[in-house]
Image (cartoon, grey):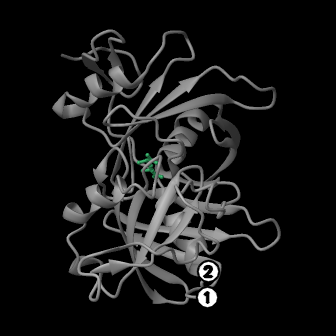
Amino acid sequence: MNGLGNEIVVLDLRGGGAAGGDLARAINAHPATKFDQMMVILPPRVAGTDAFVDIYNCDGTPAGACGNGTRCLAHVLMSETGKDALTLHTAPGILNAWREGPDRYRVDMGVPRFGWDEIPLSEEFRDTRAIELQIGPIDAPVLHSPSVANVGNPHAIFWVDDVEAHDLGRFGPMLEHHPIFPEGANISLAHVTAADAITLKVWERGAGLTRACGTAACAATVSAARTKRTGRAVTVTLPGGPLNIEWREADDHILMTGPVEMEFSGMVDLETGDWSRVDMAGEAARP
Ligand SMILES: N[C@H](CCC[C@H](N)C(=O)O)C(=O)O
C-alpha cells in the first residue's frame, strides 16, 4: 500500500507467525516489495482494541510510530469489518482511527511530548522549541536551532525558507545519528508558507528520504504552533501530497487526515521474505 507515496507493507499475522527486523530486511530486499515501513498486524493484547501493531523501518529497526502506515492499516481493517472506526494498539499507545471517505482516513495520533528526556535528547535542554544544534561553519550555519518533538517517535524540525535549497540526502544521515539523539531522530526541513500551511521534506530514521511522513507532519505542526509560526490547523504538503493536521485545543491530541492507496497483495514466506502475488480479493495466486 502507500500513504501519500510513503511505501507501506502491511503484514497480517493475526492467524499466527512472527516477524522481526530480519524479515523486514528480507522483504525489503525484493525490488517489488521495497518499502519505507512495515506494519505488522497482531492479535489484540488489550480489551477494546482491534489489533496490536508492530512497526519496522526498511532497515529492520523498530519505528515506534508511523502515521501514513496507520491510515493504511485503518483501510485494511475497516474494509474487513465494514465499520467506520477502530482502535489500534501500538508500542507508544492507543490510536483511534476513522473513515472519512472511500480512501481517506483520520487518525488520532495522541498527545505530543516536548520534554528533553522524552524526545529523547542526550543532554538537558530546557526549551525544546529551538535546541542548540547546527551544521555548517560555526559563524554561518547551514541549518540550525531545530524544534524537537516526540509524537510516538523522535523528530527534529529545521525551519527554512526553501526545502529544496538544502541537500537533505547529504545532511540527513549525519543529523539522524547525531549524538544529541540517543535513539536517532527523523529529520525534517519545514517551510512555513502561511499561518495554516507548511511545506515539508523528511529524512526518516531507518528509511532515508521518503515521499511522505505522517508523524513528521504532526511534529512539524505542533512545533510550528508552539513557536507561533502557525495556528493549530495546518495543511502540510510533502513531496507525495498534502496531509491535514489539527492539534486539538481541547485535549492536545493531534488529528491527522489523509489518503491511502492499495497497490497489490501477496503471500510472504515468513522464513525467507520470498513472496508471491495474490489478486486483491485474495483468491487466485498469480506467478
Ligand atoms: N513514515 C512514517 C514515520 C516513520 C518513522 C520512522 N522512520 C522512525 O521513527 O524510525 C510516518 O508516516 O509517520
- The residue lying at 22 percent from left, 81 percent from top is 165
Residue 80 visible, this orientation: no
Q: Quadrant of the N terminus?
A: top left
For the residues bearing labels 1 and 2, Cβ distance under 8 angstroms:
yes
Q: How many numbered discs?
A: 2
Q: Quadrant of residue 229?
A: bottom right
Q: Could you tell me which quadrant the C terminus lies in?
A: top left
Give me the residue at 57% from left, 31% from top: 53
Position of residue 195 relative to residue 15, above or below, is below
The spot of residue 166 in percent (x, y) is 23, 76
**At x 26% / y 88%, what residue is drawn?**
140
- Look at the image and tell me whether residue 107 can be seen: yes
* Residue located beneath label 1 in the image: 228
Q: Which amino acid type is shown beneath numbered disc 1?
A: Lys
What secondary structure is found at the residue carrying circle 2? helix
**Disc 2 marks which residue?**
225
Q: Position of residue 113 (x, y in %)?
A: 66, 60
